Image (spheres, rainbow, N blue to C red):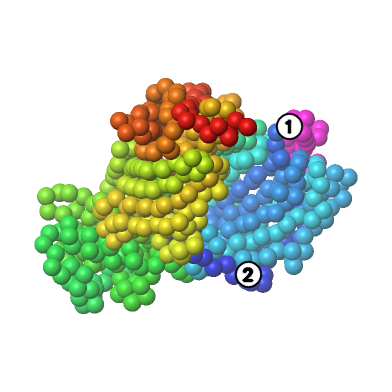
Amino acid sequence: MQKSAAIFSCLIVVSLSMSLISCSPSSSFVSLNSLKSSLNLKAFPGRREYPDADAVILSDVHNVRVEVNREGKVETNVYVTKVIKLLRNVNEHASIEIPVYSGNSLNGLSARTIEPDGSTIVLRKGDFHTITGSGNDYIFYSDEKKVRFTFPAVTKNCVIEYHYIMHESHPFIEDIWEIQQMYPVLDNVYSLTLPARLLVPPQNGGYGWNWRYKVYNCSMGAPAYHVNPDENPDYETVTLTWTKKDIPAFKPDPRMPPYLDLIQYVKFAPSRWKTWDDISEWYYGFLFKPQMDITPEISEKADELTQGCQTDSEEIERVFDFIQTLRYVAIELGEGGYIPSKPATVLERMYGDCKDKSILLVSLLRSLGIAAKPVLVLTSDEGKVDPSFPSWMFNHMIVKVTIHGGRDYWLDPTVGHCALGEIPYPDEGTNALVLNYDNTSEVERIPSSTFTQNVENISAGVILDKRGDADYDVGMRFIGQDNFITRSTIAGLSHDEMLRYCKSLLAGSYMNATVEDYSFKNTADFDKPFILQFNMEVADVLQKQGGVVLLDVDPFRFTGDWKWLDRDHRAYNLRFDYPRTATKTLNIMLPPGYSVKTLPAPTVIKCPGLYYSRIFTIGVNGHLGISETFAVTRRDISAKDYKSVKEFAEKVDRIRNELVMLGIEHPNPAEGK
């Protein structure tokens, strides 16, 4: 199981393995004339028909053939053919990567470029390269492979074609048919051919196999059914086929929900998985629980960690803090993508991936008599689990702990610097599968935090001198998601790196600032707000114009930039990482002889999901105060409110450009010369 973040990775390039790939003869290529005829076209479309597309997929065919091996296990061979016409930016789209997951093998790979004049260049054996290991999702080493190749001599309006056969030993567990893609598709076909006897009920001597699937984000009728007769009834097959034509390209918006929440696709699942309990019985009963060996070493470690604890919550916190110190390193060999290591092995290594750290956390807590269960999660950046369709939809594992009195804790063992009771935002609000002791399961929704629980507070005392230079004493306080994200970000930074980090918190126009010192508070207490303090100097914050001075003394732009609002319309909802609040308070000591002449008016701006306010005050001692608040009040904002969001951003930018006007009570006569 993988988690979408990068901590450390290793990428090893090896030579092409003939045991992995065999190349097929060029005679298996598609006849372009026949393809035109089947599409009822005189010529393939180009830039005139698709002015905004880099390419158009002429044909995308997946023919799946189901077989039963000698052990009675269902396996599949997937025959894939893809024909694409490149229209523009051709070099960016001329390289292909085919993943080969554990238990699968790739055969019959061939590819060619067809120039606009009809000449053809077929790729040779040495043009295909196998990459083993992974540089993504901080997998240290995996036996997943990727086959990469680049089409030669690509030009505008050329056609590229490739096809291959993927043998799957564990079919339909993670299979998806993507109907809609980033390019327009003229013809997309998915067919399934299987022995007819598979569909015969067991009482009649068959297997009672049932094809389980669900269609998402589009309407699809039942697949066409065709019997392929044979002289020997035992070899008779049936084919079920879907055909979808003229599918528009998927055009993503910035800051939108995950790809799979929006595109048209079909999700498959093994025949035997009719309920979530079927999945938990397979995964927990046969893969996870046999590894759950609570050895004396595990019990001794649990007792050592919890010495002096008075409550279950204290014990959980001590064990969770220990688990967070273990390095996240994934080694996924064989079925390692599903099966965790034994807890004692993880304890000895002091590293592991999400399922390794989870099984160690579960075993330590269970040895103390605390109810702890593994939980399968699909992180929110990858999509969402559909409770109505039991299937494998997971990329992560966490732990649910219940103490006496019924209080639940959701614990993600892969994060660091996280307080008990908090969960990282990719886990929040997801439908997760909680695996029970008896191999049953429940789909439960992980709680979400609110904008009042994720807070960044900035406070600064500012002393101005007559030259217009400013000295800042800054304090930043982080709560909730901002708390452990900041802790994780700065953990292990050197002194110079920390100074650069402090400068990175400032707006670009203040990058001439000099950060002089910094300090932390509550570094070891994860359940308390993290506090960062630093001092800095900024030159020339006063803009003098005759007897009037404009003051721009606020270097913190916590609303971020609005570059993602550059388009007039959007198709999909807005998605923020998590709801949060940022507040800022500046207390400015003006230099002698200066006074406030005019202040911008108090401001409150609202739109669905967003809030902003700013107010200026003058204290009895003549100090100028600025208080500002920005909040993302909910994670998702409807696309229909996009216009309101743009107007909100424009108003905030306009307001933030308003400056304080100062008067000089006793100007230096020399200044007027």
Name the one closer to the observer, 6 or 87.
Answer: 6
Question: Magenta region's main secondary structure?
Answer: loop
Which quadrant does the C terminus fall into? top right
Relative image position of residue 448 (x, y in whole percent): 32, 42
Give yes or no for residue 116 being in the magenta stretch.
Answer: no
- Residue at figure coordinates x 59%, y 54% from the top left: 78
Q: Is residue 35 left or right of residue 310?
A: right
Q: Is residue 435 left or right of residue 109?
A: left
* Circle 1 residue: 51
Q: Is residue 423 left or right of residue 639?
A: left
- Residue at figure coordinates x 44%, y 33% from the top left: 593
The amino acid pointed to by label 2 is: Val
Which mark sits nearer the N-terminus, 1 or 2?
2
- Residue at figure coordinates x 38%, y 33% from the top left: 624
Q: Which residues are magenta?
A: 32-49
Secondary structure under tag 2 reads strand
Q: Which mark is residue 13?
A: 2
Relative image position of residue 137 (x, y in whole percent): 49, 58
The amino acid pointed to by label 1 is: Pro
